[in-house]
């Protein structure tokens, strides 16, 4: 999570996190989980902003959040509703959703792999 300048470019680093989500979790579910965790962090730490820029490498999730696509999957509805609920608690003027290529999202990808590797190292055979 980064503070952004007036042009929407990354500025100061705020926080990052990782969490093992278990087996049978889709990339879209993981995207929603990560966003929900970031929004919870903002709420818990009373972080406000003029504009909230949400970027993700799942075009489906970004388009669902932006209202371009409907949320039709029962596996996603709860995640979507939780994120939209948390957005209501963030003091901001606007939200901008942007799809980014996975190659530009390496930190998130690395954190996800670290969480999987960490959990995998503690699984008993």
Image (cartoon, rainbow, N blue to C red):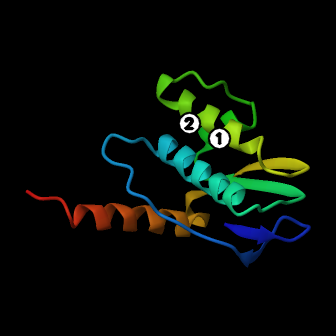
Q: Which mark is residue 109?
A: none
Q: Residue at x 30, y 45 (%)?
A: 23
Task: Kindly tell me whether residue 100 is visible in this rendering.
Answer: no
**Residue 10: percent from left, percent from top:** 76, 72
- Residue drawn 75% across the image and 31% down it: 67
Can residue 102 be seen here? yes
Establish if 37 lies above or below 25: below
Secondary structure category for the residue under label 1: helix
Left or right: 99 in relation to 73: right
Residue identifier under label 2: 79
Assess disc 1: are there few (<14), some (14-19) or many (≥20) residues with their C-alpha within 10 Å of its C-alpha. Answer: many
Quarter of the image with the N terminus in it: bottom right
Asked if the residue under mark 2 is in contact with the one under mark 1, i.e. CB atoms within 8 Å, the reply is yes
Q: CA distance from mark 1 to mark 2?
A: 6 Å
**Crowding at mark 2 (Cα within 10 Å: few <14, some 14-19, many 20+):** some
The image quadrant of residue 46 is: bottom right
Is 44 displayed left or right of 53 in the figure?
Answer: left
Q: Is residue 24 left or right of residue 71?
A: left
Which SS class for mark 2? helix
Q: Is residue 39 above or below residue 83?
A: below
Residue 110: where, in percent of width, then height? 46, 68
For mark 1, what is the residue?
83
């Amino acid at each position: 999570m980064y503070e952004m300048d007036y042009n929407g470019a990354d500025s100061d680093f705020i926080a990052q996190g990782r969490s093992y989500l278990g087996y049978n979790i889709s990339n879209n579910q993981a995207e929603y989980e990560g966003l929900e965790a970031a929004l919870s962090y903002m709420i818990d730490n009373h972080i406000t902003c003029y504009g909230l820029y949400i970027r993700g490498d799942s075009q489906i999730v970004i388009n669902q959040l932006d209202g371009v696509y409907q949320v039709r999957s029962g596996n996603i509805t709860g995640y979507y509703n939780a994120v939209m609920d948390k957005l209501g608690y963030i003091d901001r003027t606007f939200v901008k959703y942007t799809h980014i290529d996975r190659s530009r999202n390496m930190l998130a990808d690395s954190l996800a792999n670290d969480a999987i590797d960490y959990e995998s190292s503690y699984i008993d055979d």
